[in-house]
Image: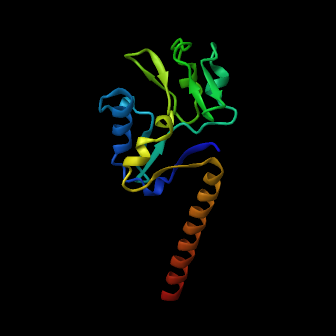
């Protein structure tokens, strides 16, 4: 069964440790610009949103690649980049709706999350458990469960406020 990263942005504290361990694991250097996961800060809301490849069903990055260097590997059950074919044109970077495709200026190649070959380091090192590696079918269930909890909490807070009035 295919697995994917499940990100609960409400747990993210913005420590960016996920970015650092990712870049160290893949490139041997602590450099967030070389990370496959990026933490986006929404200043006004005070939120940190970890973003990574969503393994899109009809992946724009895969569809736009002129040399078909990005493809669905059915054995690994994920979209991968064939670096022997990649020409570094960055078309995939331009079309990714999540900003998950990146370009390494040193190697002149694109890169994206590869789940650290089945043991994502971002999951391993996230103390807040904002990032998890779960079965694809479970992602929807987890999102619905979290939404139900938020609605339940909001209802309880509204009831408490009404009782005080």
- Along the line of sight, which residue is nearer the eye, 87 or 124? 124
Q: Is residue 19 something one can see in this rendering?
A: yes
* Residue at the extreme front: 75
Tell me the quadrant of the picture where the N terminus can be found.
top right
Compared with residue 69, is residue 98 higher up or lower down, i.e. above or below? below
The quadrant in which residue 141 appears is bottom right
- Along the line of sight, which residue is nearer the eye, 100 or 119? 119
Compared with residue 73, is residue 43 higher up or lower down, i.e. above or below? below
**Residue at the spot 56% in from the left edge and 13% down from the top edge:** 85
**Residue at the spot 64% in from the left edge and 24% down from the top edge:** 71
Q: Position of residue 115 (x, y in %)?
A: 50, 37
Q: Position of residue 65 (x, y in %)?
A: 62, 18
Q: Position of residue 69 (x, y in %)?
A: 60, 18
- On screen, residue 162 versus residue 106, left or right, reads right
Q: Is residue 41 something one can see in this rendering?
A: no
The quadrant in which residue 105 appears is top left
Picture mark count: 0
Instruction: Specify the color scheme.
Output: rainbow
**Residue at the spot 63% in from the left edge and 35% down from the top edge:** 77
Q: Position of residue 118 (x, y in %)?
A: 50, 39
**Residue at the spot 45% in from the left edge and 41% down from the top edge:** 120
- Along the line of sight, which residue is nearer the eye, 123 or 33? 123
């Amino acid at each position: 069964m295919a697995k994917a990263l499940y990100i609960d942005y409400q747990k993210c504290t913005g420590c960016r440790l996920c970015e650092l361990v990712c870049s160290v694991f893949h490139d041997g250097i602590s450099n967030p610009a070389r990370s496959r996961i990026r933490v986006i800060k929404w200043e006004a809301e005070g939120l940190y949103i970890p973003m990574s490849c969503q393994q899109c069903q009809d992946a724009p990055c895969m569809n736009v690649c002129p040399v078909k260097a990005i493809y669905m590997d059915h054995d690994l059950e994920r979209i991968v980049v064939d670096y022997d074919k990649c020409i570094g044109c960055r078309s995939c970077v331009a079309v990714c709706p999540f900003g998950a495709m990146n370009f390494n200026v040193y190697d002149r190649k694109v890169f994206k999350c590869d789940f650290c070959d089945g043991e994502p380091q971002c999951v391993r090192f996230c103390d807040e458990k904002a990032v998890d590696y779960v079965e694809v079918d479970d992602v929807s269930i987890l999102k619905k469960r979290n939404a139900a909890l938020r609605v339940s909490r909001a209802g309880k807070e509204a009831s408490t406020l009404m009782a005080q009035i």
